[in-house]
Amino acid sequence: MRIELLTRTAAETRAVGEAIAGLLEPGDVVALTGELGAGKTTFVQGVARGLEVKEQVVSPTFTLVREYRGRVHVAHVDVYRLDRLQDVVDLGLEEIGDGQAVLLVEWGDAIDVLLPAGRLEVELTTTDPTGASEERRIVVTGAGPAWQARWPRLVESVEAWGAGS
């Protein structure tokens, strides 16, 4: 299950996150990938808004984990600066929010082996190598039976950004 989307502004990238948030459930894991500046935190801001988080969402680059209260507990994690998988294990991600948090992991591909097989993967890339444009390509991949069941609703929720199966 895979779809490609295109957003033209940071506001649209947030809107995609907000649309996907409507399908997230306690315990879900979303692995975010993409180069520096690709819009991972911007996407998370949209997810948080969709999950009714009222606080300002900022990058957890130096704090590693930021937690927010909304419709469900939200944990925004950035593993970019961690050198070893043991460092990630020591964070106790599965325990955050008693295991009922929606876990949004920036640089999730770096800890792929530690994340559940049933998850949503979101890859963000810039379309302009000069960085002059806010346009982003977003590839969303769902894995596992939970996402297979929700996939038609996900595709419908993001169709405004050019979703295709």
Image (spheres, helix red, strand yellow):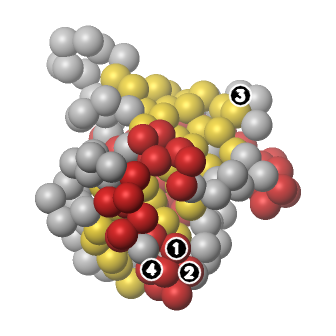
Q: How far apart are marks 1 and 3 (CA)?
A: 32 Å
Relative to 100, does residue 31 appear above or below in the rendering? above
Image disc number at residue 99:
2
Q: Mark 4 points at which residue?
A: 96
> Which mark sits nearer the N-terminus, 3 or 2?
2
> Which mark sits nearer the N-terminus, 2 or 1?
1
Image disc number at residue 94:
1
Which three-letter amino acid code belongs to the residue tagged 4? Ile
Q: Nearer the viewer, mark 1 or mark 3?
A: 1
How packed mark 1 is, by other alpha carbons closer than 10 Å (few <14, some 14-19, many 20 or more), is some
Q: Are marks 2 and 4 in contact (CB under 8 Å)?
A: yes
Is 147 on the left or on the right of 38, as rendered?
A: right
Q: Do the residues labelled 2 and 1 touch (CB within 8 Å)?
A: yes
Relative to 127, does residue 47 appear above or below in the rendering? below
- Residue 98, percent from left and from top: 52, 87
Which three-letter amino acid code belongs to the residue tagged 2? Gly
